[in-house]
Amino acid sequence: MRTLKSRLFLLVAATVLLSFLLAWFPLAGLVRERLHQKALSELDIHTRVIASVVAEGSHDLPQRLEEMQRIVQGRITVVDERGKVLYDSDVDASLLDNHRDRPEIAGAFASGRGEATRYSRSLGADLLYLALRAPGPDGRPCVVRASYSLASIGEALSLLRWRLLTALFLSGLLAGAVGLWFSARLVRPLKEIEEAARSVQDGGDIPFPSRGPREVETLASALRAMASRLRETLADLEAERKDLALILENLPVGVIVTDPSGRLRFANGSMAPFLRDRPDRVEGRPCQGLLRVPEIVSLVEETARSGRGEGTFLVRENQSRLFQAQAVRLQGGALVVVTDLTERHRLEEARRAFVADASHEFQTPLTAIRAAAELLLSGEDGGSEERQRYARSIIDQQERMTSLVDDLLLLSRLESGLPTENEENLDLALLVEDLVREERDNPLTAAIVITADRPPSAPFTGRPGELRRAIGNIVDNAVKYVGKRFGTGPGGTITITVTDEPGWWVLSIADNGIGLQGEDLDGLFERFQRGERDRGRIGRGQGGYGLGLAIAKGIIDGHGGTIAVERREEGASFILRLPRNAD
């Protein structure tokens, strides 16, 4: 009964049956009530006639009552005031018990009239009794009772029921035929819509029907428009899928996509060195059997658990190659991207080696230049004033070059992961206090208010010289940019705070200097990047080559911490976070 046609037929049948039931019960009750009232009215007339006959009291009373019984076709009973049956038309009066307690008789003696409906054991049928008080043949009160068999009412109701059932059956046949005809007209265009929809699903082009009820026509029109839009969307998706496959296939990085069960769904050509089969034959096969690199398999499993993973691994074949793999969990599996870092790593190593070697090689000529300049200054005649000025300029520039070489060497060691000193137990609060004291003694900070907010102690395990250099570089930057805004006048402030957060020591160095622009934040911690765009070497703009913040970042990273910068309405704020698990 899942088809629309069968459901419509059931609906019609249920409607007809429900209509019959809703009509039968009130109709049967109404007919029964009307028949009962009619029987009671006739019985009342019969009883009054019989009472008048009894009141006349002739000697042939029994014969007259028998004639009355034949006329009324009902039972007639006469009872005296004591309840004794004087006459009964259906049963010998001597065989009947006392009727004084009969409800209709008791009611007649009490009020002159009584009626009741009950089953008669004497006659074995349901009877309607009506009793009237009347004078007896001897003048004393008696009760005349007449009865009416309710079987005729039941027969009338049964006849009515059968006629209604016959009408129900005929109307049901008619309604079923009409319903089947109507459902056929309704279902036929729906079947055509279903066939057209299946054709669209299979890529066919069966047109949707254009006839039927208005609602079906509206539905077919909407489905026709939807099918057209669906074809266009599918064509666009197919084109995008081909474009995406072409892009992924030609990427210089390896890409694989897996499903939730760890089976490969896609692998591009760059993944061929890591597969035991061709990339176009891997779909649906498990990663464990296809991937030659265990690190990638472990990364896929880790991504399934945590949602994201990353790692580097070395492949040793003809020559060692370094790769980085990054993975992220997708709704239907995982996406893994493998990047070859070999050339980048070689270039970085070569750059570091060049910086270290060049820095070492610079030391000898710089030392010779300084020695020659000092020799010129220390000559017996002292030379002219102009020659001495040139000699001092040579010494100043030699010191700047030496400082630059030292910074490059330090940065190279930091990037290579080699510590410049041993770790010690230290107190960050005291280290900050010493730096503040030194900065306050600097002539350039005479007009700048430097404050420190720190806890009584901040125990930490690290390299104190490096930390002093990192924090000092940031404070020096703050001094320079505050001075750039206020000059030698008042108003400049630098605030250094040390706070304790769960698992971290947080150092904040905030100033109200010239601040940073949006473009200044990009690559601020890269080498040879300066917060000021001009490269002037005059006054307070004089000094660094953009290595101070790169060195600070390398030192903080080497201690397992992080460094960040935030713009403020006035100035900038550098946030240094050092892990407390190192204390």
Image (cartoon, grey):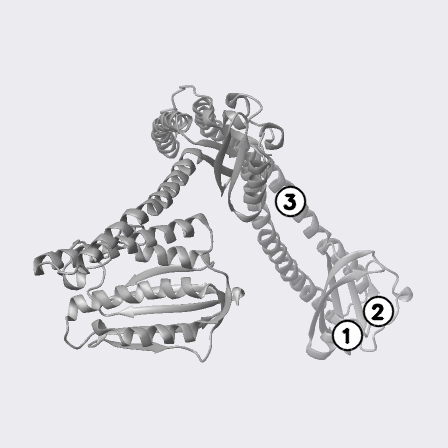
Residue count near mark 2 (Cα–Cα under 10 Å), binned few <14, some 14–19, many ≥20? some
Q: On screen, 568 above or below 344?
A: below
Mark nearer the viewer, 1 or 3? 3
Residue 142 numbered tag: 1
Q: In which quarter of the image is residue 512?
A: bottom left
Residue 161 numbered tag: 3
Residue count near mark 3 (Cα–Cα under 10 Å), binned few <14, some 14–19, many ≥20? some
Q: On screen, 518 above or below 487?
A: above
Does residue 543 appear in the picture of this structure?
yes
Q: Which amino acid does label 1 sit on?
A: Cys
Check disc 3 and report its element: helix, strand or loop.
helix
What is the x, y in percent for residue 480?
Answer: 22, 65
Q: In which quarter of the image is residue 485?
A: bottom left
Q: Which amino acid does label 3 sit on?
A: Arg
| Residue position marked by numbered label 2 in the rendering | 86
Does residue 545 appear in the picture of this structure?
no
What is the x, y in percent for residue 449?
Answer: 25, 77
Q: Quadrant of residue 64?
A: bottom right
Q: Earlier in the sequence, mark 1 or mark 3?
A: 1
Q: Earlier in the sequence, mark 1 or mark 2?
A: 2
Q: Is residue 216 left or right of residue 311?
A: left
Q: Which residue is drawn at 49% across and 30% down?
A: 183
Distance CA(mark 2)–CA(mark 3): 41 Å
Q: Along the line of sight, which residue is nearer the eye, 201 or 508?
A: 508
Q: Which amino acid does label 2 sit on?
A: Leu
Distance CA(mark 1)–CA(mark 3): 42 Å
